[in-house]
Amino acid sequence: MNAQTYLAYDFPLLSAFWTMLWFFLWIMWIVLLFRIIVDIFRDDDLSGWAKAGWLVFCIVLPFLGVFVYVMARGKNMGRREIAQARAQQEELNAYIRQTTAAGRTSSADDLARLSEIRARGDITDEEFRRAKELVLSGHGPAGHSSSTHPSGH
C-alpha cells in the first residue's frame, strides 16, 4: 500500500464530516462575533463606556462575551438592524426624489420651449399644435415618454 491509501484510512468519512461541522460552526461564531461588534457600535442607547465595556468583554472572553451579549441584548439586535435599514432606505428615497426633481421639467417649461422653437421658425404651427397637445396630455417631454423632437427632425 502506498502513502495515499494509508491517508484515506486515517481520515474516514465520518471524521471529515465532523471536521466540516466544526469548521462551519466556527465560521458561524465568527460571523456572530462581528455582528455583535457592529451592533455595539450601532446602538445609540449605550454610552461610550458601556460600548467599551462590551467590546472588551467580547474580545477578552470571546465565547462568554458573545453568549452573555446575546442573552442580555440580543432581543433588540434585530430591531436596531431594521431601524438602520429603514433609515438608509429613507435616505436613498430622499436622494432619488431630490435628484429626479432637479432634472424634471414642468409642462410650462416645455410649452415655453416649444413657443421659442416656433418663433424661430424651426417648426410649423401644425407641429406646434400637435406637440402642445402631447405636452398637455402628459405624453410629451414633461411626461418623460420620449426625448425626440416633436417634428421628427
Image (cartoon, helix red, strand yellow):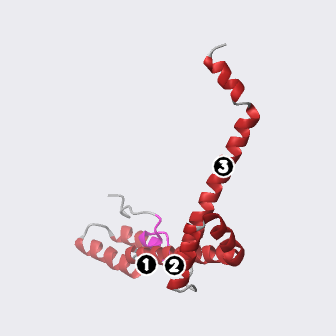
The answer to which of marks 2 and 1 sits earlier in the sequence is: 2
- Work out how far the residue at label 2 is from the one at label 1, CA to CA, in angstroms: 39 Å
The answer to which of marks 3 and 1 sits earlier in the sequence is: 3
Disc 2 residue type (three-letter): Ala
In the current view of this chain or complex, which residue is farthest to the right? 14
Disc 3 residue type (three-letter): Phe
Q: Mark 2 or mark 3, which is nearer to you?
A: 2
Mark 2 highlights which residue?
52
- Secondary structure under the numbered disc 1 in the rendered image: helix
* Residue 16 coordinates in the image, percent (x, y): 70, 36
Q: Which residues are magenta?
A: 133-145
- Secondary structure under the numbered disc 3 in the rendered image: helix
Disc on res. 98 = 1
Camera-nearest residue between 138 and 67: 67
Q: Mark 2 or mark 1, which is nearer to you?
A: 2
Task: Find out whether residue 143 is within the magenta segment.
Answer: yes
In the current view of this chain or complex, which residue is farthest to the top? 1
Mark 3 highlights which residue?
24
